[in-house]
Image: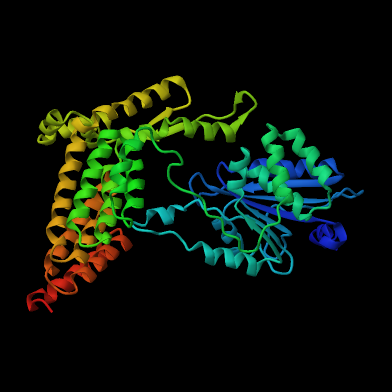
Amino acid sequence: MTRLDRIAARRGTPQESGLISLAILAVGGQGGGVLTKLIVELAEANGYFAQSTYVPGVAQRTGATLYYVEIAPRRSVPPVFSLMPSEGHVDVVIAAELMEAGRAVQRGIVTSDRTLLLASNHRILTIGEKAVPGDGTVEPDEVQSALFDEAKRSIVFDMQRMASETGSHISTVMFGALAGSQALPFDRAAFERVMQANARSDADLLAFARAYDLKPVSGQKDEIPTGLSVKPSGLDAFEHRLSGLPDSVRPMAEAGLKKIVDYQDIAYGEEYLDGVEDAVERGRDGTFAEAFAKHLANAMCYMDILRVADLKTRASRFARIEQEFTKGATPTYRVTEFLHPRGEEFIATLPAGLAERIDRSERAKRMVDRILNKGRRITSNRLGGFLALYAIAGMSVWRRKLFRHRQEMRWISRWRDLAFDIVAEDPALATEVVRAQRLIKGYGDTHARGSGHYDKVIEGIGLVRGRADAADWARRFIAAALADESGAALDGALATVRGFVDVGPQ
């Protein structure tokens, strides 16, 4: 008998050895390591051998990591554990996010004859999904359907929501769901002893209990509310203006107003409603005005350094981080912000008059960029780093006097005037002009690239204006721009139009 044969004999089949294998797939920060520790501690406390390994990855955000655990009853001869999961040999797969569950199915570790799949159906967008200029989101229903088709048994629900509702962490919910699944040979009391020894607060015990008692519905889809749950102060003053808008426009205008006031102030909200009311007067139906209400809010809430600093210093952000990463009264984390401001972004935050003089000088711009274009790391949950970001965010009170604001208002004025000019002759085409605003987002290179695509779309609209199918062509231009970051698809669509534009309206 060879050495490998002896190892295989010692390992035995799962039925002979009582070996149970578990794979955990989690995105960075979701507590996959914590869950692995709990499972190992549970097994060892109940007379089992246990081994855990992990392989870090870079699939999403801070990286998706695969943790692997094998447990087996204690016997005179210790078992030989595997270091990695293999296709068709995993008893339990736990995925802390829907796409990670899909990856587990893809790599073959979820099988219909053996595997229990515990998965959260909430989403964390992958880098590939976010990189698409338009909506690159993968259809979640197709992935979730595959989970029920491929596994022997599936328990799928929104674990992140349960964690938020109980004030706990998703790793605790996963541990409770694992206990409730009865996939491991340990009773509830055994799980609870481990949970009580490791709980940071009563919230963890509550989350565990709720997940244990949950009876998930196959294919259940939870809707997560979005937007502000509380009106920013001062919005009551706008109730009479909102009530005067058409029914088809009012919900979008109210959502846009909340966003505007949260971004800047009440006066900025008045400017926004002025624009919406103007669109209502000019549009023949509510479609144009509804689209304008949506995209005007997005245009007025442009992303700049001040906004980035504001979002990074909000109390709600630190409360969420503290809830997830604080043990008792002692912080167990450090929040590091990776920033790389460029010279042009700094110039954009200067008073408009000064910035325009600098912007006209290539030499001055190069000098500013040489000084400032460096990567920086700021620890935002320490006093010095927080105060630096908070001071930058506080500059928003002067936002209307800054160069970036002047640039954005000029762009909004041209965009609005073009849409208003077209709406009387072709409301459908004017609506597409309004929707073309979605091409412009972010700042820096992303903003510049989107602006370039927008300019090409408007050029194309100028070519087809007056044709009966002008709106259809505008939709094609926008779709092409959103589908291809390089702009090749948009260039192809424009070339097609230039080929027949001399034929005249059809």
Q: Residue at x 13, y 62 (%)?
A: 424
Q: Position of residue 222 (x, y in %)?
A: 56, 55
Q: Position of residue 220 (x, y in %)?
A: 60, 60
Q: Residue at x 81, y 46 (%)?
A: 188
Picture colour scheme: rainbow
**Of residues 64 and 220, the one drawn nearer to the viewer in this rendering:** 220
Please indicate whether residue 469 sits to the left or right of residue 75 in the image.
Answer: left
Q: Is residue 221 above or below residue 370?
A: below
Q: Position of residue 413 (x, y in %)?
A: 15, 47
Please indicate whether residue 355 sits to the left or right of residue 346 in the image.
Answer: left
Q: Quadrant of residue 470?
A: bottom left
Q: Residue at x 26, y 58 (%)?
A: 435
Residue extending furthest right?
Answer: 76
Q: Is residue 492 above or below residue 28?
A: below
Q: Position of residue 76 (x, y in %)?
A: 92, 48
Q: Is residue 213 above or below residue 38?
A: below
Counting labels gives 0
**Of residues 434 and 32, the one drawn nearer to the viewer in this rendering:** 434
Q: Is residue 439 visible?
A: no
Which quadrant of the rendered structure holds the C terminus?
Answer: bottom left
